Image (cartoon, rainbow, N blue to C red):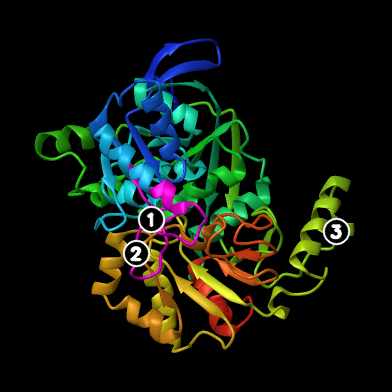
Amino acid sequence: MPETLFDKLWREHEVRRLSDSRSLIYVDRIFLHERTGSVALASLEQGGRRVRQRAHTFCTMDHIVDTLPGRGDDTLMPGGRDFIVTTRSSARAAGIQLFDINDRDQGIVHVISPELGIALPGTTLVCPDSHTCTLGGLGALAWGVGSTEAAHALATSTLRVQRPQNHRVTFQGQLSPGTTAKDMILFTIRELSAAGGAGHALEFSGEAIRELSVEGRLTLCNMATELSAFTALIAPDDKVIRYLEGRPFAPRGSLWQSATAHWQTLVSDPDARFDAETRLSVAGLKPQLSWGTSPEHSMDWDDSVPDPEQAPTGATRDAWRRAQDYMDLRPGSRLGDYPLDAAFMGSCTNSRLSDLRLAADFLAQSGQRVAPGVKALCVPGSGGVKRAAEAEGLHHVFTEAGFEWREPGCSLCFYAGGEGFGPGSRVVSTTNRNFEGRQGPGVRTHLASPLSVVASACAGHLVAAEAV
């Protein structure tokens, strides 16, 4: 019987079918971080249990750790030190691999997982973080879980999982220069809605997907959770194999040969049946900017802010009004009409080397500097990204243009009571979420690609690089 890529991965990891819609699934890899991982490890300790597969369990410091130079265990977040110290103690006691604050490979969990070859095509991976679906860009079946589920997976290497439906999203056409994977996913959420993937495992396919770099695919899958999807997948190809070869935790020797032979079978069969099909044309797609308090509230960068009176439903009208009140926007105005206070380059969505190269190339070629009054930060996603960027001199490009150059971590992707932008600040950000208060109380966040973020930072207002 023809199978989708998701069907194949589910079947390969199904330990037992519990009902028509629920199965016990084997978990190959578990990744923890200090914000929620410490809770899972503490739960395990209190129950007198141990980690079943220590060699396949990993932990990093990323969410709460400061990104300021010279950082240590103390953080700007109240009580943050306790999370860090507790996680370190629990990880060591459990005997699992810990990427501590000053480890050369420390970084954001969804950045270092593929970078180190921990996430691999065909594997299952869970993490107590909703953006674990990022790793579907390699062809891994990865999803976010809660701390209780993480503890169960640590103890048993299994989880009971409700089987989602299959939904293929086919991207037709080629991206225009200056338009990125971030623009693709914002456009997709705008078209399908923030609930458009609910109950589904998405498979992204089509010409535009084949042309994307591996890191672009990771960006695309990262925001599947903003579609309310269970996860997202892209079939691994030669690009993925080349990307993974030689990574520290990737197979070697004969194991590499057998692994790559298997990876090449991880593709949906030609006659496989999907429960839902969506086709989107990205030919001529313009850079996207969010205007509201959901990624769904996105539009072409040069469009006008929509009028709530033109909304398709009453509920949508009310949501648009609330969003525009919070964002302090006028219907019919242009986003470029509003001055910016800050710009943020980073997060598990857009902090990889290719993102930094793209942004730095714009700064170097344009010769522009950050506009007066704009606070601009660049936070690499990992120690590996930071070292590679510095070896290429990218940090000089950013700092000379007026950006702060930080240590790896989640940083100002989200506000946890520590560092944040001031109330009422208008921020352009490469992050994945823009709900009220995401980057600090009263902060107004506009989501954008790395190119649009640096172009906007230099212009002092929202704009796309193509207009500069």
Q: Quadrant of residue 448?
A: bottom right
Could you tell me which secondary element the residue under label 3 belongs to?
helix
The residue labelled by disc 1 is 215
Mark 3 is on which residue type? Pro
Q: Nearer the viewer, residue 426 or 24?
A: 426
Q: In the image, residue 245 lies at what x, y percent? A: 20, 48
Q: Which residues are magenta?
A: 59-84
The C terminus, quarter of image: bottom right
Quarter that holds the N terminus: top left
Residue 228 is marked as: none
Residue 72 within the segment the image draws in magenta: yes
Q: Residue at x 62, y 62 (%)?
A: 440
Residue under label 2: 353
Q: Measure the C-alpha gap from mark 2 to mark 1.
A: 9 Å
Classify mark 3: residues with Cα within 10 Å, few (<14), some (14-19) or many (20+).
some
Q: Are marks 2 and 1 in contact (CB under 8 Å)?
A: yes
Residue 95 lies left or right of residue 283; in this view the side is left
Judging from the image, what secondary structure is the residue with disc 1 in?
helix
Q: Which mark is residue 308?
A: 3
Q: Picture coordinates of residue 103 (x, y %)?
A: 25, 55
Nearest the eye: 35 or 48:
48
**Amino acid type, callout 2:** Leu
The residue at the point 25 percent across, 31 percent down is 54
Q: Earlier in the sequence, mark 3 or mark 2?
A: 3
Q: How far apart are the two marked residues, 3 and 2, measured between alpha carbons? A: 39 Å
